[in-house]
């Protein structure tokens, strides 16, 4: 599994979904309990910004106010910067300082990938868009979550209880 290539593929999916978000959908509810589409858009755009900046050893870039019209372009900018940062010499083998602690670079890139692909589903559901993801990519994201998501994290705040896909 190459987490940078996986993220590259997931970022293409997210960018396409962001292009399909209509202005009137920004206040639609998502399956994430406390998030409207606007919150989810902010999260998926902010993820590559924060993770990529950490991999590059710098603070995240300032993000402008996100609208359905500019989210895809801002996302692409941050996603490309994250891909470049994680593709740097030795980054995947190094330790990356994240706001929640130090982690191996490969794990940070894997978490970014899994988070983004998971939220692609959330975004597609909330906006009525079709999600077309290769099964092997989805299985790799599931594998990341199965390895890294401890039962104690499933407190209903950040993560809810595991559910069967329907």
Image (spheres, rainbow, N blue to C red):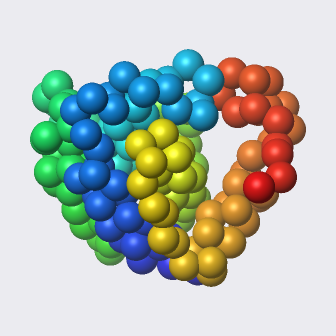
At 23% from the left and 53% from the top, the residue drawn is 19
Q: Quadrant of the C terminus?
A: bottom right
Q: Residue at x 62, y 78 (%)?
A: 135
Q: Residue at x 48, y 63 (%)?
A: 131
The image shows residue 158 at horizontal and vertical percentages of 65, 28
Q: Is residue 50 visible?
A: no
Viewer-closest of 41 and 99 = 41
Image mark count: 0
Left or right of residue 3: residue 69: left
Q: Nearer the viewer, residue 89 or 86?
A: 86
Residue 124 percent location from the top left of the image: 46, 51
In the image, taking residue 132 as reference, residue 157 lies left or right, namely right
Relative to 117, say whether 155 is above or below: above
* Residue 88 position within the rendered picture, expressed as x and y whole percent measured from the top left: 30, 70
Q: Give whichever of 80, 117 is nearer the camera.
A: 117
Determine which quarter of the picture holds residue 21: top left
Instruction: Give the quadrant of residue 16.
Output: bottom left
Q: In the image, is 104 to the left or to the right of 157?
A: left
Please state the horizontal and vertical placement of residue 25, each as a whole percent of the image. 33, 32
């Amino acid at each position: 599994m190459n987490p940078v290539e996986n993220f590259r593929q997931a970022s293409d999916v997210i960018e396409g979904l962001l292009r399909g978000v209509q202005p009137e959908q920004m206040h639609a509810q998502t399956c994430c309990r406390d998030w409207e589409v606007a919150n989810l858009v902010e999260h998926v755009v902010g993820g590559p910004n924060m993770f990529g900046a950490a991999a590059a050893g710098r603070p995240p870039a300032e993000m402008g106010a996100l609208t359905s019209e500019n989210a895809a372009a801002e996302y692409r900018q941050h996603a490309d910067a994250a891909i470049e940062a994680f593709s740097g010499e030795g980054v995947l083998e190094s330790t990356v300082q994240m706001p929640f602690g130090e982690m191996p670079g490969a794990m940070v890139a894997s978490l970014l990938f899994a988070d983004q692909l998971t939220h692609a589903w959330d975004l597609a559901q909330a906006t009525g868009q079709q999600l077309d993801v290769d099964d092997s990519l989805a299985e790799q994201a599931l594998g990341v979550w199965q390895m890294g998501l401890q039962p104690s994290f499933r407190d209903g705040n950040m993560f809810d209880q595991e559910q069967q896909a329907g």
